[in-house]
């Protein structure tokens, strides 16, 4: 009887191993399909980088949703190093961050720079931590236009525009803006500035009047921002990890889970694509794009 039972035991053992392997493979596939690298057991904190000029929010939105739905991710850190960017993208990320903070603790860790739209996003988190020398704030709206009419005259080029209404070519580089157009754009910018103020007041749980006093576009150091209530703690990224551990009641060591990143091909991405992105970003900045962006010059790595 013992010898007869051995084949059955062996089959069951092989079947169990096969099921375990299949489950592991499926877990990895499901994890990667949600943009989250597979990691082992233990406490996990999701880390989402917010780097460079904020243009397309889709990747960050997908990461927020994936981390929020993943029961193994106990909390989230937004690792910010950005001068801000487009109004729409900043607002989309802000909204999704607020939604995520209802179910999981979210901490914003600002590195060297977290200004304008980047601060807009940070204000949606539960807590903000920054270095004493971090540059942050710059609560306001920017709209830039490039003018080339004098250059066109010098090279003998004239532009003729046929339009359906008085304001259809408002902001055109081929002519000076009229006073009526300036008034209209200033009214638009003031409306979007008020949206910024309201978002910060709600996210930071601050009186709107207090935010209004700071919303003249000025930049603050991390230390100044803490004194003004725009930042909760001074510290680096590791301090942010320790903070979110306490907030989420996580004991012991944690695993930091970063979203999967696409590998760059050496020739195209490093030599050509990055240069093309830099040039296009420069053009967009002067093409009438409404932005929550600090216009200073400061090195921000992607």
Image (cartoon, rainbow, N blue to C red):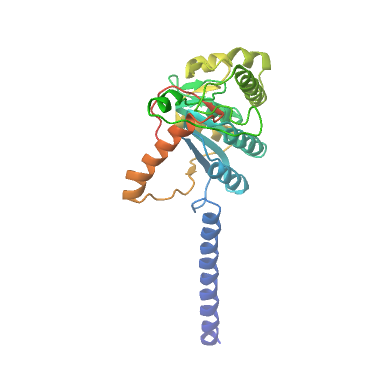
**Above/below status of 199 relative to 99:** above
**Above/below status of 267 relative to 294:** below
Farthest top residue in view: 213
Count all numbered tags in the image, as a single digit. Answer: 0
Note whether residue 302 is visible: no
Q: Quadrant of the C terminus?
A: top left
Q: Nearer the viewer, residue 88 or 127?
A: 88
Note whether residue 106 is visible: yes
* Residue drawn 65% across the image and 34% down it: 164
Q: Nearer the viewer, residue 245 or 140?
A: 140
**Above/below status of 103 relative to 205:** below
Indicate the position of residue 77 as horizontal and vertical percent values.
53, 36
Side of 264 relative to 40 (left or right): left
Q: Nearer the viewer, residue 7 or 197?
A: 197
* Residue drawn 58% across the image and 33% down it: 90
Q: Quadrant of the N terminus?
A: bottom right
Indicate the position of residue 275 as horizontal and vertical percent values.
36, 40
Q: Nearer the viewer, residue 296 or 14?
A: 296
Indicate the position of residue 80 as horizontal and vertical percent values.
49, 32
Indicate the position of residue 88 as horizontal and vertical percent values.
60, 34
């Amino acid at each position: 009887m013992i010898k007869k039972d051995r084949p059955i035991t062996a089959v069951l053992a092989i079947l169990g191993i096969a099921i375990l392997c299949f489950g592991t493979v499926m877990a990895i596939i499901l994890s990667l399909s949600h943009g989250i690298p597979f990691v082992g057991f233990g406490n996990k904190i999701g880390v989402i980088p917010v780097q460079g000029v904020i243009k397309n929010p889709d990747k960050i939105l997908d990461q927020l949703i994936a981390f929020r739905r993943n029961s193994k991710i106990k909390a989230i850190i937004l690792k910010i190093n950005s001068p801000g960017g487009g109004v729409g993208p900043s607002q989309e990320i802000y909204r999704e961050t607020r939604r995520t903070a209802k179910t999981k603790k979210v901490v914003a860790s600002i590195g060297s720079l977290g200004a304008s739209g980047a601060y807009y996003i940070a204000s949606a988190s539960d807590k903000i931590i920054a270095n004493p020398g971090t540059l942050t704030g710059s609560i306001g709206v920017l709209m830039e236009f490039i003018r080339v009419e004098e250059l066109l005259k010098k090279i003998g080029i004239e532009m003729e525009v046929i339009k359906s209404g008085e304001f259809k070519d408002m902001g055109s580089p081929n002519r000076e803006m009229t006073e009526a157009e300036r008034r209209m754009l200033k009214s638009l910018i003031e409306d979007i500035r008020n949206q910024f103020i309201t978002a910060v007041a709600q996210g930071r749980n601050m009186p709107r009047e207090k935010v209004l006093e700071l919303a003249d576009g000025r930049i603050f150091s991390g230390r100044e921002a803490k004194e003004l209530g725009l930042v909760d703690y001074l510290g680096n990224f590791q301090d942010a990890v320790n903070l979110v551990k306490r907030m989420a009641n996580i004991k012991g060591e944690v695993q930091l889970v970063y979203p999967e990143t696409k590998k760059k091909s050496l020739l195209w991405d490093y030599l050509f694509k990055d240069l093309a992105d830099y040039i296009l970003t420069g053009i967009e900045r002067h093409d009438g794009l409404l932005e929550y962006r600090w216009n200073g010059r400061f090195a921000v790595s992607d």
